[in-house]
Amino acid sequence: MNIYQEEPWKTHRPLLKFFMKEFPIKRVVEHGVGIFSTELLYNKDIDYNGYDENPEFLSHVQKLYNIPEDRMHILETAKDAIFTTHYKDIPQEEKDKLDRIYTELDSKYAQATGLSLLFVDGFTCSRTVAINKLYSKFDVVLYHDAEPPAIAWYEYKFNNDLLDRYHHVKLTGRISWTGMFIKKEMYVDFNKLTPYVQEYCKENGVAPTLMNVVEVK
């Protein structure tokens, strides 16, 4: 099992810290657990559930951060898929299975009491499906690898209702960007994000001028 430590794998950290510390988040669903994300999202005092397609990695993260097993879930999505498998390359029956899995997962979550956050950073073939199926139950939806060259690679295609009801914003970076969908009725003062970006840049040797909040038109 490869554990990557390079900076592009953790560019979402300023945003995760910002939302978890500045907002009273009561529910978190993490689609694609991570060394650099789960430690910021898991909190025994909130309703956290982590999902991953890689059982070995899921177990590693669960043990690393001492998370109760009933908070971590294996997703058996596309057969024989690996992290880089594209949605367009899986058979139709596997696409239908993905649709059923996320429809069932969506039905599991009633509207939360308090703010809720979805973070998507899992297998390539399931990212767009996860976002398009689950977004309506969350106030904030974050997804990693949102830079222009990655849009085609991850096959990000968002449905019109999501684009109509949420502000679409991105945090740029040296390499990997992080995308955000924020309900339009929710106010976010991104000036308060600045200290988290500055902290991250100092820790990782990144010029702060490379990390900016931009609105997607």
Image: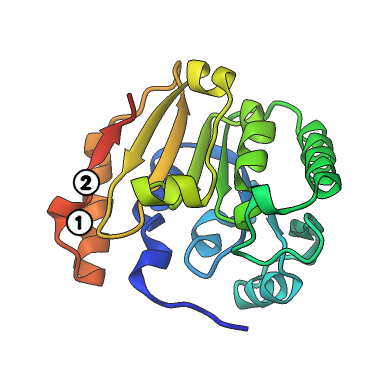
Relative to 39, is 61 above or below? below
Q: Amino acid at mark 2?
A: Thr
- Residue 165 image point, x, y percent: 51, 17
Kindly tell me whether residue 45 is visible in this rendering: no
Q: Which residue is mark 1?
A: 198
Relative to 108, is 68 above or below? below
- Residue 171 image point, x, y percent: 31, 44
Kindly tell me whether residue 100 is visible in this rendering: yes
The mark found on residue 13 in the picture is none
Of 195 and 78, nearer the camera is 78
Quadrant assignment for the N terminus: bottom right
SS category of the residue bearing label 1: helix
SS category of the residue bearing label 2: helix
Q: Are marks 2 and 1 in contact (CB under 8 Å)?
A: yes
Quadrant assignment for the C terminus: top left
For the point 69% across and 33% down, the residue is 133
Relative to 178, is 104 above or below? above
Of 142 and 128, nearer the camera is 128
For the point 71% across and 69% down, the residue is 54
Query: Is 52 left or right of 205, judged from the image as shown?
Result: right
- Residue 27 image point, x, y percent: 63, 41
Q: Amino acid at mark 1?
A: Gln
- Residue 128 image point, x, y percent: 60, 41
Relative to 33, is 216 above or below? above
Query: Is 91 left or right of 179, judged from the image as shown?
Result: right
What is the C-alpha distance between the residues marked 2 and 1?
A: 6 Å
Near mark 2 (Cα within 10 A), the count class, few <14, some 14-19 or many ≥20, is some
Q: Which residue is mark 2?
A: 194
For the point 22% across and 50% down, the residue is 211
Across the whole image, how many numbered discs are drawn on residues? 2
